[in-house]
Image: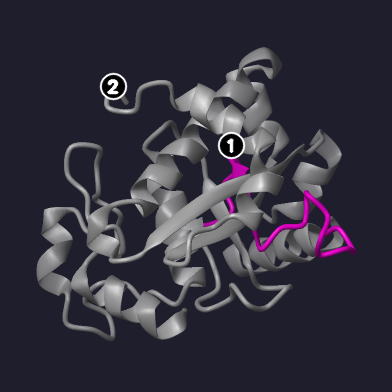
Amino acid sequence: VGDLPNSLELMTERLGDAERKRRHARKDDYNIEVLLAVDDSVVRFHGKEHVQNYVLTLMNIVDEIYHDESLGVHINIVLVRMIMVGYRQSVSLIERGNPSRSLEQVCRWAHSQQRSDPEHAEYHDHAVFLTRQDFGPAGMQGYAPVTGMCHPLRSCTLNHEDGFSSAFVVAHETGHVLGMEHDGQGNRCADETSMGSIMAPLVQAAFHRYHWSRCSKQELNRYI
């Protein structure tokens, strides 16, 4: 992550400036205000004293991915609230080996955390849930509803956290919520998957090679 200088400083500043930033999005900018939920398995793995800095940096990388020119529009991932989920709650939300049930429970829980006043500084458009628990079959990196961003109960993603490369998983799952399909499934962008397209069915994007496919760009534009 050497290409992301001061990423932690930038993200911490962004968290503090969320209220001001949401009021001053440029006309061609879209702000997605995010509730980030970090479950107990992630907290235990990284350690309580390090986990906040780690996830702030991770979300700053997601923000950078959404600033890539290949997307065609400028989307800001603005972190407005972070919740460290306790052990009992974490275990009850994730049903091992059942991604759809786990996602449903996580989405319902995130909705229950929503601020009632849309003007509240911590009101979110989208929830990102990070876990190290196995919610799906081996190798499943994330799970999300397609085109859920405008539905209060469906604007959320479930993501398996496994280091900074998980930023591509979060970007991919959030892409689904923004209306993007897998490249080569229901569209003609299969040729871009080997070049590191973010919406490849199996995320192969890496820090040295990633882009949004022409299909992702078109699908996003249809949705927004």
Q: Secondary structure at mark 2?
A: loop
In the rendered image, the quadrant that contains the N terminus is top left
For this orientation, the residue located farthest to the top is 49
Q: Helix, strand, or loop for circle 1?
A: helix
Neighbour tally class for label 2: few under 14, some 14-19, many 20 plus, Cα within 10 Å: few
Left or right: residue 19 versus residue 182 is right
The residue identified by callout 1 is: 14
Q: Which stretch appears magenta?
A: 114-141
In front here: 149 or 176?
149
Dominant secondary structure (helix, strand or loop) of the stretch shown in magenta: loop
Q: Any magenta on residue 9?
A: no
- Foreground: disc 2 or disc 1: 1
Give the label on residue 2, or none: 2
Type of the residue with mark 1: Arg
- Whether residue 7 appears in this view of the structure is yes
Q: Earlier in the sequence, mark 2 or mark 1?
A: 2
Quadrant of the rendered image containing residue 72:
bottom left
Residue 69 position within the rendered picture, expressed as x and y whole percent measured from the top left = 24, 56
Residue at 58% from the left image edge and 36% from the top image edge: 14
Q: Quadrant of residue 23?
A: bottom right
Spot occupied by residue 148 in the image (x, y as percentages of width and height): 59, 76
Asked if one can make out residue 141 in the rendered structure from this viewpoint, the answer is no
Judge whether residue 119 is colored magenta: yes
Disc 2 to disc 1, how far (Cα)?
20 Å
The percent position of residue 183, horizontal first and vertical second, equals: 25, 72
Instruction: Give whichever of 27, 47 is nearer the camera.
Output: 27
Type of residue at label 2? Gly
